[in-house]
Image (cartoon, rainbow, N blue to C red):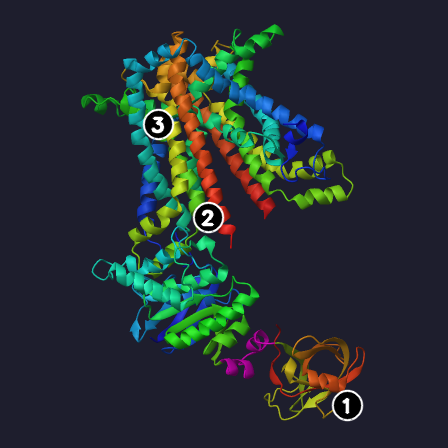
Amino acid sequence: MKWSFKQHSVIPGFSLALGFTVLYLSLVVLIPLSTIFIKTAGLSWVQFWETISSPRVLASFRLSFGASFIAALVNTLFGLLVAWVLVRYRFPGKGLVDALVDLPFALPTAVGGIALTTIYAENGLLGSLLARVGIKAAFTPLGIVIALTFIGLPFVVRTVQPVLQELDAEMEEASACLGATRLQTFCRVILPTLLPALLTGFALAFARALGEYGSVVFISGNMPMKTEILPLMIMTKLEQFDFAGATAIAVVMLVASFVFLLLINLLQWWSARREA
Amino acid sequence: MHIRTFFTDARHSNKQRSTSESRLVRWLLTSVALVFLSLFLLIPLWAVFSQALEKGFATYLTALHEPDALAAVRLTLLTAAIAVPLNLVFGIAASWTIAKFEFRWKNLLLTLIDLPFAVSPVISGLIFVLLFGSSSLLAPWLSAHNLHVVFAVPGIILATIFVTFPFVARELIPVMQAVGTEEEEAALTLGASGLQTFFRVTLPNMKWGLLYGVILCNARAMGEFGAVSVVSGHIRGETNTIPLHVEILYNEYNFAAAFAVASLLAMLALVTLALKKFIQWRQEVAAGAAEYQ
Amino acid sequence: MSIQVQHITKQFGDFAALDGINLEIPTGELVALLGPSGSGKTTLLRIIAGLETADGGNILFHGSDATTQSVRERNIGFVFQHYALFRHMTVFENIAFGLRVRPRKLRPPKQEIADRVHELLRLVQLEGLAKRYPAQLSGGQRQRVALARALAVEPTVLLLDEPFGALDAQVRVELRRWLRRLHDELKITGVFVTHDQEEALEVADRVVVMNRGRIEQVGTPTEVYDQPASPFVYNFLGNVNLFHGRVHDGKIEIDSAAHAGVTVGDRDTAATVGYVRAHDLDVDRVAKDVSSMAAVVRHIHAVGSSVRIDLTLQVSNEPAEAQISRERHEELSLSVGEQVFVTPRRVKFFGDYQI
């Protein structure tokens, strides 16, 4: 019993369930995903480097990371606000608003993409208002940030909301008793408690934004060097049957995703430890 | 309704307390949040339906009755009908393994199940092109047997299965972990067999989580765009799902038709959200009943 | 049905949960496994049930080896600590479950199942609650449903894991008397786990005191309380005073008071500890004999059927506790700060044992 793979249990079906789980996981996820790394291994360093350091690809790296970062930042700020309002205040239609927050999860990205493009185009409902003050949204990096904000919106709200709900009211009362103003209580007591959830939400929104394709391709206009995001670069390379180039970009994106996945796991481990 | 009672504190309605903000701040924060949500959620949703009906209801119906649109609907339904049950069976097996047993490498398994969430949809499509495409190792064998995976229906289904892979498992694992193993042990002490235990005790306990997972999995399966776009040949009436059909119509500047078809997906999204809310409400009722003694 | 536990060992990583357990439970007895948390009592119960497997040793039911039998084959009734009621089933369905999952050939007809469930509901005094769900029951009611469910399959052995642990004090006392009466009626071999000494002493025919994966003592409640086999049992059952002393010239000296007639072997000047129950410590104004010790009254708790007096021994500064009757208390009319003499009526010496 000193070293065993599994603790004894009377509940049956472990081997069958584990076997099926691992088999299906391997067939559907692991083997297909490994093709990327096998393909990359077949590339020479020069080939790899040439692909990812070409000016057009570099521009899309900058754009994808930059726009995703800004969108995630916007979502962190407003996501906190929305979570706060949903948990702390009462207003008519709150249940409906709460349900609607998940819309970007449920709405197919292509639908979100064409809807946002229509609204933010120069002749669109909001685009025309922005045009009047000289701001172009659709077919510019701003449009990309808008689309990425849309698809990342639920992440911060949904990570912060439960933490805010569980927040001990006595902590805030203690802070008030000790003479802190409401703003001081928020900044020094509430915000630090929410920090792990906020960071997790940020990382989730960022990771999602980095890989997003459907909602962005319509609003971005896809101009080389200006509004081409990374997934679109993969798409373009594929259309030119440049599998090596597509794979090279994909590997960089995958590694970035895995780093985020690791980061998110670490954050959750950190917050779990803080709670215990 | 007066503003006085309009924006109130959820915890203690009327009195201003030391642990609440002033009415003005509350009003301001709520307004900003609602404006933000309107800009990013409400207006786009409204835009889909208003654009769809811009040229009248007759045009709307025509767009939906068009043979290519109907073919896209059929393909989307077929894809979901294959991907969702497969991922459902996987979800049950994975959650049974992870929630009911203690074993080594469990956390690794959990992370691997989440993997497709971390992969860009475009890459999810790309891997199947690399695996089954013209430059792959399997290509000679596939062409010798006249099998078409990429740029054909099997590719679309495979990519959809990959993208929707974690949904059911992710919903079921926490539900099953929360239930624990005592009820299964009790069933076994009372003489139930493994299958009897599963169908009479485990399954009824996880039915809401199961439904929830299936709904989310289905919404994504029907709405997936990026991954499917890579492996689809974009052949009208043959390898177009609803989202791809929307794209084609939109790129042809046939906006009314594009939004008409898109409105189907938007309605699916709204139904998904409504069901999700309903399930949450059911679970809260159940939790509330559990607290009553 | 009798249960024999032979050389059972169980290891969790580096931790020895059970270390060579031997135990005989005769037919029809109700036995308590008593011990602190981590003593291995629940593990032993689960191994008897077949919910856990032992690393070594055998479990015999009525003389025949059941070690390799699965939990389904053992025909035991198990009542879980948190009841493990099926939350999506009514009380009726919960109790009927064990009968309904039987293979078709062995399954009683519907009417018979219904009759049996109603009979059990009467037995556990829950008639009229058959259609309720577990969530709509109080803790005590859930406990009784769990018991009825376990009894429905007519088990040969009834095993209960901390049966009253999750209940509040008042319900707990009521329910354990009820369980005792029920056992007297049914005469089924029963084993229950508890960490509450009062519960074990009141309900069980026989108490098994466990500590760190070993059995410290097996005996009737009177035996384990009056003749503890080890310092651990002394300490675990009831309030006890510890007096540190030395062996000198074949006598034990505590606080310079001599205790003659106690044999502790010939190890002269060895350290030893005397154990005296609070109600075995007499309090007087004058020294009664050579074993009396001077002490100062620190506090008097005069609530309840007896009076508890906190004292400090004068020489060693050790605290002590005496329990005297109300009459004796009135007779003495002590006050805080007063000097008195305490005399142990019964002392048990063990070697130097640190708790």
- Which label was assigned to residue B160? 3
The residue at which mark 2 appears reads as: B178
Q: Nearer the viewer, residue A137 or A199?
A: A137
Quadrant of the rendered image containing residue A162: top right
Q: Nearer the viewer, residue B3 or A38?
A: B3
Residue in the picture at 36% in, 40% down:
B91
Neighbourhood count class around disc 1 (C-alpha, 10 Å): few under 14, some 14–19, many 20 upward: few
Residue type beneath disc 3:
Thr
Measure the C-alpha gap from mark 3 to mark 2: 30 Å
Are marks 3 and 2 in one subunit?
Answer: yes
Neighbourhood count class around disc 2 (C-alpha, 10 Å): few under 14, some 14–19, many 20 upward: few
Residue type beneath disc 1:
Val
Residue C341 rendering spot, x and y as whole percentages: 75, 86
Nearer the viewer's eye, disc 3 or disc 2? Answer: 2
Residue B220 rendering spot, x and y as whole percentages: 39, 28
Residue in the picture at 46% in, 22% down:
A212
Residue type beneath disc 2:
Ala
**What chain letter is assigned to the residue under label 3?**
B
**In the displayed structure, does residue B6 sit left or right of residue C141?**
right
**Label 1's element?**
loop
The residue at which mark 1 appears reads as: C286
Q: Is residue C299 above or below residue A251?
A: below
Measure the C-alpha gap from mark 1 to mark 2: 64 Å
Q: Magenta segment, which residues?
A: C221-238
Q: Is residue A217 above or below residue C117?
A: above
Residue C167 rendering spot, x and y as whole percentages: 52, 63
